[in-house]
Image (spheres, rainbow, N blue to C red):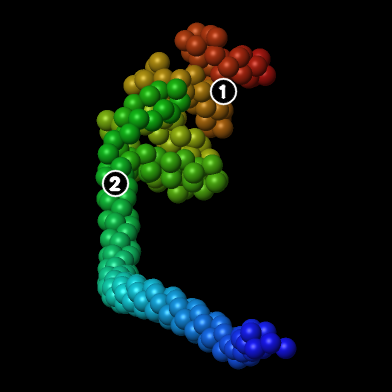
């Protein structure tokens, strides 16, 4: 081999050796770049995570602050509401006390009003007992004193009960006490009947005569004449009885008493 060929081959061999020596160095250089890139990327990711975590921490802190403020506001509202509730409870207790007192006052007023009403009613009753009233007796209407009416009714009740002595006494007392009464002629009529029941025919005849004389238009006048004739018959005065019945028929021909008198007159013949 020539020197030139040897030199070329030697250069080629040296180049290959150099190339072989440079391959590991390049590989190492490449690996270092990748590692740096990885480290940089990791740092960037770490930085991003830290920034994200910081943002989250800030947001969380902000949220916590807002929540804390809301909680504090709510606490203040609760406290205020509790104070209002306590105030309302106090007012309610006061109102209840006032209502209870008002109820007692109303009850007391109602009792007083009831007492006043009862007293007023009593006064009204007493006034009514004293006030004249309209009455109708034997078809005659007139105004009578309450006491006047009571005495007449009591006397009439005694007569209807068959107590002729009591009735006669009461009717006689009535005619003396109430000489201008609208009851007067009715009282005389029933007085005559009470005397008849007592068999005091003379006094009965006088009473019936007085009644017919003073009130010939009274609805009881025909009956009074018939009762007078009966008293005469009981006194064995048939002649007087016939005369009285004749008077009855003449003065009150259409009355029921006159019809009864006709029948009695027929029996006397």
Q: Position of residue 56 (x, y in %)?
A: 42, 76
- Residue 202 visible within the image: no
Q: Which residue is mark 2?
A: 124
Q: Is residue 154 above or below residue 103?
A: above
The mark that comes first in sequence, 2 or 1, is 2
Name the image quarter holding residue 106.
Answer: bottom left
Q: Residue at x 56, y 23 (%)?
A: 238
Q: How many marks?
A: 2
Q: Residue at x 54, y 42 (%)?
A: 160
Q: Nearer the viewer, residue 181 or 104?
A: 104
Q: Which residue is mark 1?
A: 238
- CA gap between label 2 and label 1 equals 56 Å
Q: Residue 182 shows which numbered tag? A: none
Q: Residue at x 33, y 41 (%)?
A: 146
Q: Secondary structure at mark 2?
A: helix
Q: Position of residue 58 (x, y in %)?
A: 36, 76
Q: Nearer the viewer, residue 192 or 19?
A: 19
Q: Nearer the viewer, residue 13 or 98?
A: 13
Name the image quarter holding residue 209.
Answer: top left
Q: Nearer the viewer, residue 197 or 35?
A: 35
Of the two numbered discs 2 and 1 in the rendering, the one whose residue sits closer to the viewer:
2
Q: Residues at badges 2 and 1 in contact (C-beta under 8 Å)?
A: no
């Amino acid at each position: 081999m020539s020197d030139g060929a040897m030199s070329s081959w030697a250069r080629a061999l040296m180049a290959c050796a150099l190339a072989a020596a440079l391959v590991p160095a390049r590989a190492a250089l490449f690996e270092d770049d990748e590692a740096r890139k990885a480290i940089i990327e990791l740092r960037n990711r770490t930085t991003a995570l830290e920034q994200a975590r910081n943002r989250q921490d800030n947001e969380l802190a902000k949220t916590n602050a807002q929540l804390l403020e809301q909680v504090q506001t709510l606490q203040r509202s609760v406290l205020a509401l509790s104070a209002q509730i306590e105030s309302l409870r106090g007012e309610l207790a006061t109102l209840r006390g006032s209502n209870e007192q008002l109820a007692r006052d109303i009850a007391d007023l109602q009792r007083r009003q009831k007492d006043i009403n009862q007293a007023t009613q009593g006064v009204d009753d007493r006034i009514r007992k004293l006030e004249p009233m309209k009455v109708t007796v034997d078809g005659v209407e007139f105004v009578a004193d309450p006491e006047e009416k009571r005495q007449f009714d009591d006397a009439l009740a005694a007569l209807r009960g068959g107590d002729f002595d009591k009735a006669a006494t009461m009717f006689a007392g009535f005619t003396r006490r109430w000489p201008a009464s609208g009851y007067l002629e009715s009282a005389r009529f029933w007085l005559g009947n009470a005397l008849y029941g007592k068999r005091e025919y003379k006094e009965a005849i006088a009473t019936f005569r007085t009644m017919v004389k003073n009130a010939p238009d009274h609805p009881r006048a025909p009956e009074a004449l018939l009762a007078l004739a009966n008293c005469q018959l009981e006194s064995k005065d048939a002649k007087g009885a016939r005369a009285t019945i004749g008077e009855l028929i003449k003065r009150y021909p259409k009355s029921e008493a006159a019809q009864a008198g006709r029948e009695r007159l027929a029996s006397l013949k």
